[in-house]
Amino acid sequence: MALVSFVRIALLGIAGGVSFVAPSYGAEDVERGAQVSRSCMACHSFSPGRHMTGPSLAGVWGRRAGTAAGFSRYSDALKRSEIVWTEKSLDAWLRKPAALIPGNTMLFDGIPDPGTRADLLAYLQAVSEGRASAPERGLPNLKRVDASSQVTAIRYCGDAYRVLTGDGKSRTWWEFNLRFKTDGSPDGPSTGKPVIVGSGMQGDRAAVVFSRPEEISMFIRRECP
Ligand code: HEC
């Protein structure tokens, strides 16, 4: 199934942003840092207000730890740390999060190499100051998917789900390998239009994403072919 584009990094405006260029970092550092930032994007977005497992990192530079508006899952350890995110504190955090703030819930070992961290910091600062554009979220916009990902019906029979898609095809999944998820964010699917993701050619598991939990059992019908 054609799956929706993955993380693409767009670095715009670096050349044009001369007046804002920080003294310590160059454009190449920012570009390398953008590559490093991919390791963050499983859990973080750089778009304002777009929270995932971790809070949005838009505007993190200079912000007090634990204060991204609308993110409700901070650990007490992070909230109580009274750290402000500067070059120095971010460098310590990214070297070893558990050492800087014991008891935090960011499952990330850290980046041992100082040069790699410096590149990433250059990027975080550039994104926070609007000199580098935030990359697309690591997940696709589920309102714009092609027909092969658009779920039109789900039938449950025995120990399996048969998922029918907008391209007229259907595929049957062992019930244990099909997950049901919700995405109520603006990038989530439209109401009544769930989307199947992660069902690559070889994959034996996938997820159907709904706009809200109430839809899930309403959408699935018990019916054997
Ligand atoms: C496995 C998921 C995961 C990965 C990977 C990850 N983070 Fe995090 N991050 C989190 C979570 C969860 C929190 C909140 C931690 C807490 O509240 O204790 C967090 C918090 C943060 C914070 C503090 C934000 C604030 O508002 O105070 C920063 C900065 C940060 N992460 C940067 C990064 C960077 C940069 C990377 C990539 C090198 C990264 N993280 C990788 C999950 C992740």
Image (tube, grey):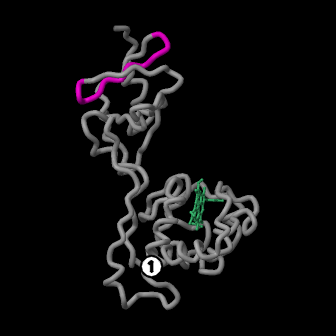
Describe residue 197's horizontal placement relative to residue 177 as left or right. left
The answer to whether the residue bearing label 1 lies less than 8 angstroms from the nearest atom of ligand 1 is no
Q: How many marks?
A: 1
Q: Identify whether 123 is placed above or below 180.
A: below
Q: Identify whether 175 is placed above or below 92.
A: above
Circle 1 crowding by C-alpha within 10 Å: few under 14, some 14–19, many from 20: few
Q: Identify whether 118 is placed above or below 214.
A: below
Q: Quadrant of ligand 1?
A: bottom right
Quadrant of the rendering where the N terminus is positioned: top left
Quadrant of the rendering where the C terminus is positioned: top left
Label 1, secondary structure: give it.
helix
Pinpoint residue 58: horizontal percent, then vertical percent: 46, 68
| Residue 138 sits in quarter | bottom left
Pinpoint residue 135: horizontal percent, then vertical percent: 39, 63
Closer to us: 162 or 223 = 162
Pinpoint residue 112: horizontal percent, then vertical percent: 67, 68
**Rendered residue at 26%/39% (across/down):** 146
Q: Is 164 a magenta residue?
A: yes
Q: Is 12 a magenta residue?
A: no
The residue that disc 1 covers is 28
Q: Identify whether 58 is placed above or below 225.
A: below
| Residue 209 sits in quarter | top left
**Rendered residue at 37%/10% (across/down):** 223
Residue type at the position of mark 1: Glu
> Which region shows up in magenta?
158-168
Closer to us: 61 or 11 = 11
**Rendered residue at 55%/79% (across/down):** 62
**Rendered residue at 45%/32% (across/down):** 203
Pinpoint residue 148: horizontal percent, then vertical percent: 28, 33
